[in-house]
Image (cartoon, coloured by chain):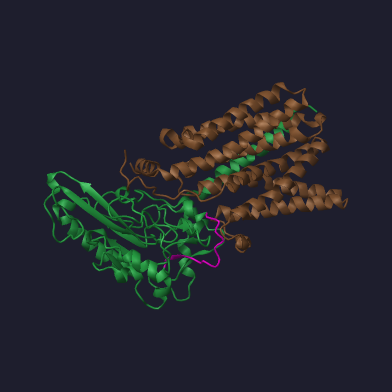
């Protein structure tokens, strides 16, 4: 028996009477213009308080990172390159090649992993997989133990300071229930954030990748979390990237830690036996 | 230097307060103490057995307070016990703690009522749950995306087992009748020596990059303090056998070594999450 399957959170989606096609986001970073409409729409719809109002000095990014009250985050990467990359590709709005530089922008979000570590490790059952295949925190069940925070391989989920429980993107579960598009995708003016059935998004992304790669400046373009052969079984949210994942603050080879859970318990069992053996040996070996 | 997004963390560090490393030590000590209690009974050293039992019970009164105080929404602590969820080491751990404390409390109640055979049987039940209680916290930490915790899942349980044995041995040495400290002293010295040894093995297996968080910053200080106290405690424990004061000094050193070790592990995890190079370089190496 494959223990990975036995401990996998993926199966939980099968418990619904009327399962929906799996929904997700395809974030095409080549189309992002860094307007942050997604960040604003997300805050508005989900009634999330402002949390970063300072000036970071990190390009146009004053948001910094995803956290409990920021569920969309636009990254800005300024790259100074040699003259070779200077020729502009006008159809790629976000990638401004001028005098040897380029400017990458990417709207980051919860990946809604196929094998979700946050969901696996949650001790209360507060995190659940919805009928849409997304991963959602039940705010009224979470007791704020914080275990999901270091468990997430993307550093997405976080404990909220104001109410003490964990929070992250719900893929607008409430809007999905009513057949609506999530707020960020609705607000995106360039269709950099595309919402839909995951199968359909995969098809669109493959087409788009072929088109982007045909341009000589974007041979390195890749789809991130598109497949099901990575360490999280693929993302419900996946991305078209023009550079290595770590350039965008994403892990190059994320894995769900629960995958090694059987080996972890085996190692712990050995240590427990050593503890007992050591105590027994000392009890027998020490003089009275 | 690997690429990163403005040097920002990729994974989030844990959000636990110092209650949690304190709990790791207290829970580990209680688990090992329950085993030493039963072993002492077998040696007919009832004074020592009683000390270990009282110490374990005291630990189990403090432990839930520490765990609940750390929650974001403490009033919902019981949500941990509304589900049985084997994919969550924290959920399993909560059940282990509950069962262990229950057995120990019931044993003490039976003892007060004069039901000695029931009391002894429940001591054995607690001793069966004790080793899992001592080592499950290592699985809890390893089942995260925190680089130094996850990558040490094979060795970390042995560090925690050593710390537990040393702590319980120290409790026995400090409080048992002087005629009954021989067995406890053996375990205290063996555990104290095993603590830096298992720690070194763990660092060696982590490799030069991922062991770095144990050598630098706050975690480096805790690691060195732990090793120094462990060696001092073992030496004083071995050569100060005749003196009650020296024995108690040794016990205090060994207890301190274990506490510093738990804080070292907690802090090293935090340091390894905050610097993206540990995530990126270890994942790049895995893929290569």
Q: Is residue A164 left or right of residue A113?
A: right
Magenta stretch: dominant SS? loop
Front residue of A188/A263: it is A188
Q: Is residue A116 left or right of residue A101?
A: right
Residue A6 can be seen in this image: no
Task: Please tell me whether residue B131 is drawn above or below residue B71 in the rendered image.
Answer: above
Q: Is residue B230 left or right of residue A84?
A: right
Q: Position of residue B132 (x, y in %)?
A: 64, 46
Q: Position of residue B103 (x, y in %)?
A: 74, 52
> Which hue belongs to chain A?
green
Q: Residue at x 52, y 49 (%)?
A: A262
Location of the N terminus of chain B by quadrant is top left
Question: Is A144 inside the magenta-drawn segment?
Answer: yes
- In which quadrant of the rendered view does residue B28 lie? top right
Q: In the current view of this chain or complex, which residue is farthest to the bottom?
A: A178
Q: In the current view of this chain or complex, which residue is farthest to the front?
A: A54
Front residue of A157/A61: it is A61
> Which hue belongs to chain B?
brown
Task: Please tell me whether residue B227 is drawn above or below residue A121 in the rendered image.
Answer: above
Q: Is residue B222 left or right of residue A242?
A: right
Residue span colored magenta = A133-146
Task: Please tell me whether residue B79 is drawn above or below residue B106 in the rendered image.
Answer: below
């Amino acid at each position: 028996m494959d223990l990975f399957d036995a401990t996998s959170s993926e199966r939980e989606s099968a418990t619904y009477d009327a399962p929906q096609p799996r929904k997700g986001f395809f974030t095409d970073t080549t189309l992002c213009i860094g307007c942050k409409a997604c960040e604003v729409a997300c805050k508005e719809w989900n009634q999330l308080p402002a949390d970063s109002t300072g000036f970071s000095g990190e390009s146009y990014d004053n948001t910094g990172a995803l956290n409990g009250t920021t569920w969309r985050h636009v990254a800005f990467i300024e790259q100074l390159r040699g003259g070779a990359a200077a020729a502009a590709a006008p159809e790629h709005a976000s990638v401004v090649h001028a005098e040897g530089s380029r400017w990458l922008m990417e709207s980051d979000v919860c990946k809604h992993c196929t094998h979700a570590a946050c969901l696996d490790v949650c001790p209360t059952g507060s995190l659940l997989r919805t009928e849409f295949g997304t991963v959602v925190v039940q705010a009224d069940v979470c007791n704020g133990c914080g275990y999901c925070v270091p468990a997430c391989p993307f550093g997405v989920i976080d404990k909220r300071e104001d109410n003490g429980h964990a929070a992250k993107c719900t893929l607008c579960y409430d809007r999905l229930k009513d057949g609506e598009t999530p707020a960020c995708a609705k607000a995106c003016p360039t269709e950099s954030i595309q919402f839909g059935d995951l199968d359909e998004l995969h098809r669109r992304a493959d087409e788009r990748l072929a088109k982007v790669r045909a341009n000589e400046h974007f041979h390195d373009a890749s789809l991130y979390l598109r497949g099901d052969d990575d360490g999280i079984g693929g993302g419900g949210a996946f991305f078209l990237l023009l550079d290595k994942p770590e350039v965008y603050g994403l892990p190059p080879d994320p894995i769900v830690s629960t995958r090694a859970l059987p080996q972890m318990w085996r190692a712990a069992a050995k240590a427990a036996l050593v503890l007992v053996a050591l105590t027994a040996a000392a009890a027998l070996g020490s003089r009275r | 230097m690997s690429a990163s997004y403005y040097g920002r963390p990729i994974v989030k560090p844990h959000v636990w307060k110092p209650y949690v490393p304190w709990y790791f030590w207290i829970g580990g000590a209680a688990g090992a103490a329950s085993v030493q209690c039963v072993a002492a009974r077998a040696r007919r050293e009832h004074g020592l057995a009683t000390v270990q039992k009282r110490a374990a019970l005291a630990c189990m009164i403090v432990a839930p307070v520490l765990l609940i105080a750390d929650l974001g929404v403490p009033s919902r602590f019981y949500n941990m016990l509304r589900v049985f969820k084997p994919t969550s080491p924290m959920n399993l751990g909560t059940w282990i703690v509950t069962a262990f404390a229950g057995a120990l409390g019931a044993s003490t109640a039976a003892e007060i009522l004069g039901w000695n055979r029931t009391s002894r049987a429940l001591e054995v039940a607690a001793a069966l749950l004790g080793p899992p209680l001592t080592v499950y916290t290592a699985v809890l930490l390893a089942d995260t995306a925190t680089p130094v915790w996850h990558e040490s899942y094979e060795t970390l349980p042995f560090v925690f087992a050593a710390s537990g044995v040393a702590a319980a041995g120290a409790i026995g040495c400090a409080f048992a009748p002087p005629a009954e400290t021989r067995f406890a002293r053996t375990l205290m010295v063996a555990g104290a020596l095993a603590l830096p040894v298992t720690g070194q093995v763990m660092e060696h297996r982590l490799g030069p990059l991922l062991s770095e968080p144990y050598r630098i910053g706050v975690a480096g200080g805790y690691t060195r303090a732990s090793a120094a106290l462990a060696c001092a405690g073992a030496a004083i424990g071995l050569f100060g056998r005749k003196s009650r004061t020296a024995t108690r000094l040794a016990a205090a050193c060994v207890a301190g070594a274990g506490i510093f070790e738990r804080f070292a592990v907690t802090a090293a995890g935090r340091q390894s999450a905050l610097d993206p190079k540990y995530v990126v370089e270890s994942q790049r190496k895995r893929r290569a």
